[in-house]
Amino acid sequence: MKDIKHFYSLSPKWFQKLAQEIGSDAKDNKIITIPENLGVGNIYFVEVTPGISAIYKDYTLSKNTRIVKIKTEEEFFIFNYNLLKEEDLGHKKDFSVYSNHLEKVTETLINERNFGFTLLVDKKVIRQLIKEMPDAQHLNKKLSDDKVYNDYIDIKSLMLIFSLEKKVINDSLFDYYISGISYKVLANFLDQRKN
């Protein structure tokens, strides 16, 4: 089994290190192409706005791989929409939110597609958004510094994330498209989980 260790950051400083870890490079600090000796596909990173970044992944690995997200002291939440198997949608909890302070381990099997979307949201930004909402205590309970919140992906976010399959990541407009999706997906989280 191949081990890959990485960390997240709201800035692209983490992205080049991830590329080196898997034996690739980070084109324009945005696109990692999975090397042929490891599989096929891409990982895309964009800073949406100060305090919000997004990661889109669509790749298949040719080796069993353990991916370890190392904890760091940077203060943000990770909103992970993981669509490993389309046939499992609606049958398992594909959505999770956890603090960057937590370590996360994912094991990927040979020829298993990894398709998903991740938002990195500064804790100050999300807390300010929640503060403006009625019944904020419900959302605050779901955002914890020491445990993972798991749930199902809401249908609106699911359709938005699947729409990324139809886009070309090398297109100059892809940043704008993924940024728009980021805002909508975050709004869906706030709307769907306020009660």
Image: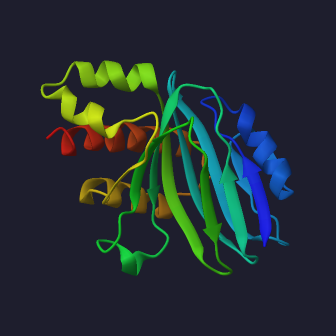
**Which sits in the foreground, 103 or 116?**
103
**Which sits in the foreground, 20 or 147?**
147
Q: Quadrant of the N terminus?
A: bottom right
Picture residue at 44% right of the left edge, 25% below the top:
123
The image position of residue 86, as x and y in percent, is 41, 76
The image position of residue 4, as x and y in percent, is 76, 57
Q: Quadrant of residue 95?
A: bottom left
The image position of residue 101, as x and y in percent, is 57, 35
Please tell me whether residue 135 is drawn above or below residue 86 in the rendered image. above
Picture residue at 68% right of the left edge, 59% below the top:
67
Q: Quadrant of residue 102?
A: top right
Please tell me whether residue 93 is drawn above or below residue 32 in the rendered image. below
Task: Farthest residue to the front: give it.
Answer: 146
Please tell me whether residue 92 is drawn above or below residue 81 in the rendered image. below
135 vs 62, left or right, is: left
Q: Is residue 170 visible?
A: no
Picture residue at 50% right of the left edge, 47% below the top:
118
Which coloring applies here? rainbow
Q: Quadrant of residue 83?
A: bottom left
28 vs 136, left or right, is: right
Please tell me whether residue 167 is drawn above or below residue 62 in the rendered image. above
123 vs 174, left or right, is: left
**Which sits in the foreground, 135 or 148?**
148
The image position of residue 39, as x and y in percent, is 75, 72
Q: Quadrant of the C terminus?
A: top left
How many labels sit on residues?
0
Picture residue at 63% right of the left edge, 26% below the top:
73
Q: Is residue 110 visible?
A: yes
180 vs 194, left or right, is: right
